Amino acid sequence: MNQQERFQDQGKMLSDFYSEVWVVCPACAKKALAKVNIETNTVRLYCLNCGYNKETSTKLSPNATILMAAHDYFGASLWLQSSFKNDVFFAYNGAHLDYLERYISANLREHKDRSHFTLLEKLPKFYHDAKNRPRLLKIIARLKLK
Ligand SMILES: [Zn+2]
């Protein structure tokens, strides 16, 4: 069995991918970015295609920061998403998509010290089902070309 077929849960959390999210630009519908700046407690949605640029605070009140994925502050749609049967396959950004691809394409999936908190452990069932693998990999390949 080669390296490619093995995959070990790296313990990543979904929140590890919160700070930079690829979104559909609300103005031109091309790919835009939503990015959190933890130092200034702000989050910005900007589009290199049309120049759309909007910034908001990540704080609900002076003492309360809301932790959520960058696009959620704007209610923006994810760039990397596709319907799968009655579910939705999605990734926040390219690194997240790569991570899912490595997991889904692996034949041997190792979960050491299950915590039930990692992104992979929390994935809906359809991601884990070997019979869905070919279709999921097709979706991933298509999203990569987007
Ligand atoms: Zn735009």
Image: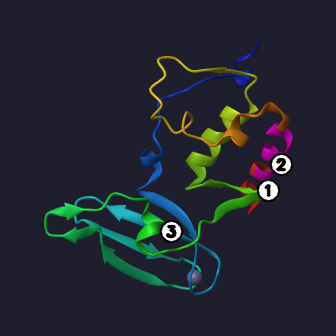
Decide which of 76, 130 is in the foreground and name it.
130
| Residue 132 drawn above or below residue 24 | above
Crowd rating for badge 1 (residues with CA inside 10 Å; few <14, some 14–19, many 20+): few
Q: Say whether disc 2 or disc 3 marks the residue closer to the N-terminus.
A: 3
> Could you tell me how far apart the alpha carbons at marks 1 and 3 are, in whole angstroms?
19 Å
- Magenta: main secondary structure equals helix
- Residue that carries the numbered disc 2 in the rendered image: 138
The magenta span reads 132-139
Say the numbered circle drawn on residue 142. Answer: 1
Query: Mark 1 to mark 2: distance in Å?
Result: 6 Å
Q: CA distance from mark 2 to mark 3?
A: 24 Å
Q: Amino acid at mark 2?
A: Lys
Q: Quadrant of residue 36?
A: bottom left
The amino acid pointed to by label 3 is Leu
Residue 78 position within the rendered picture, expressed as x and y whole percent measured from the top left: 59, 66
**Label drawn at residue 25:** none
